[in-house]
Image: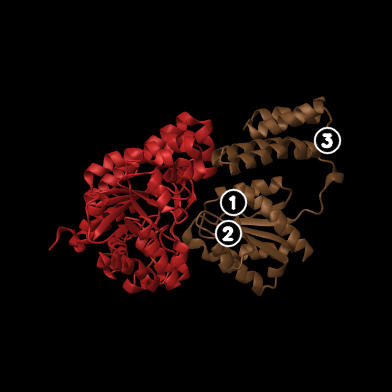
Chain colours: A red, B brown
Amino acid sequence: MNQQDTPANLLAGTLHREKSYRPPCICPGGMMNMLTVEAMDLCHTYWPEAHSDPVLMARLAAAPFAAGLFDNIGVPFCMTVEAEAMGSAVDLGDRQTEPRVTAYAIASVEQWDKLSPVSLDRGRAKVVLDALARIRAQYPQAAIIGNLTGPISLASSLVDANALYKELRKKPQAAHALMDFVTDNLITFGRAQIQAGAEFIVISDPSGTGEILGPRLFEEYALPGLNRLCQALRPLCSGVIVHICGQLRTVYPQLAQLESDAISVDAAVSLEKLRENVPGKVVMGNVSTFALAAGKSDTIRSLCRGCLRSGADILAPACGLGTTTALSSIRILMETVKEAADAD
Amino acid sequence: MSRKEELLAELDRCVLEMEDDTVTGVAQEYVDAGYDAYEGITEGLSKGMEKAGQLYEEEEYFVPELLICSDAMYNGLDVLKPHLKASTDQGSKCPVIIGVVEGDTHDIGKNLVKIMMDTAGFEVYDLGRDVAVEAFVEKAKEVGHGIICMSTLMTTTMGNMSRVIESLKEQGLRDRFGVMVGGGPLSKSFADKIGADLYTANAAEAAKESKNLADKIANS
């Protein structure tokens, strides 16, 4: 059997720029949700219960992989695990709604020293680690992904974003202290995820975009945290992917300094432009989440082919999946990467 | 330049240059001198906020800068508002009902739109974040006509936007409201698909385009 025949090796090979027999087809989980109502029906396991039970989390996370939709299995299903562990209050949502922060841990970056460190032996952080161990035991061939909330996004789940964004400018010293603390905790959680069974780490930072922060604050706050995570976690696993939302035009020079193996982008981003301006990165993306939800198979198929043509090394839904997306629509992604393999 | 003009220019500058502390003293000096509070808002604070919005569109300013500018504007407004004369009441303001749809608590974008709409002279009813479909519709019944403006940052909650539109139809309210949507993952084609009247990509554009939308409703 060829080394690359397992989905895990396929993704690892692609991230390390080895020639592979086809592009991987991934939906990481975390911010980039891969679960739909139909996928939950497949395994009779549902949100919100699966957010806080490792057996249910592992079973539900594996359902899209087991159905042949993606090369990976990823946990958790939301961006609130770290924030909850550090002191924010979370509503776990319902079958179709993701968990969300309902009360912030602190009111200002200056109170960063009141935050709790992420504890790995209780709460949903432990649920995630236990789920990873179960997934590893049952699906060793899958590309197992541990998801982390990006540093700015986690900070904006601990302090109201309105205050955080202003204080990045007005209280830089405390803001840096908060970002350092947040990043240290993410490194701890990321290391534990790898130890528990994650072979890849995906970091999504939707609140830390160039569009929101502008190039100066992106470089001062977002980039250093992401790079510290990459430096700490890349040597321990088979690859780190960073997802950044929104238009990237204003921060191309900063993204060129990003130390991840791959960069994942929104549907709004032109992959040609990205490759031109941020050379040397493995690119993941960026089939429109909306087109997938809308369900017109011809449109989806031509978008998938277009992504591969314009340089996606890894095919993925741009911002994860809406919960109402049909399995038949999702299946087109995998069909397209397989068709690319047959064509070679 | 008269002292009044100087102070108006200073109010404008304080907002534009994020002087959210200094602005309070300037506004105080302005009202103490007996100058018209309404003009202080329209010719001072709002001008600065409009320029800040312009810089945001030009990608000179980003969200943090715009938020501090808006703090400066509201700090100035707090001083000027109690001095507004009753006669300058603007009865013809178009109402805007704004909120982040249920399931989502990301409200930065919504707050920016609210600020720019305030500046543009709309009567803004802010329902906050994580707003239930029914709450939009209840408020629409109460206000009677105007614009409903919804946002979300999450792909999983976009469906609630079309639920609001459907519910407005069921209640026979759809014709009396312009519906606009925005937020990170949205697009014009999504807005068209759910039957919204307008999609805008950022706050400055939202305020501008909503003026056209308000005119359209007023003339229909």
Residue drawn at (25%, 58%) of the image: A143
Q: Nearer the viewer, residue A270 or A220?
A: A270
Q: Chain of mark 1?
A: B
Q: Position of residue B101 (x, y in %)?
A: 56, 59
Q: Secondary structure at mark 2?
A: loop
Q: The N terminus of chain A is located in which quarter?
A: bottom left
Is residue B215 rendered to the left or right of residue A258? right
Q: Nearer the viewer, residue B143 or A70?
A: A70
Q: Quick one: label 2, few (<14), some, or many (20+) residues within 10 Å?
A: some
**Crowding at mark 1 (Cα within 10 Å: few <14, some 14-19, many 20+):** many
Q: Which residue is mark 3?
A: B36
Mark 3 is surrounded, within 10 Å at the Cα level, by few (under 14), some (14 to 19) or many (20 or more) other residues, namely some
- Residue to which mark 1 is pinned: B110
x, y percent for residue A309: 36, 59
- Viewed as shown, does residue B55 lie left or right of A326? right
Image vertical order of residue B211 relative to residue A343, above or below? above
Q: Are marks 3 and 1 in contact (CB under 8 Å)?
A: no
Residues under labels 3 and 2: Cα distance?
Answer: 38 Å
The answer to whether residue A80 of the structure is visible from this angle is no
Check the image and report above or below for B53 versus A337: above
Q: Is B72 on the left or on the right of A305, as rendered?
A: right
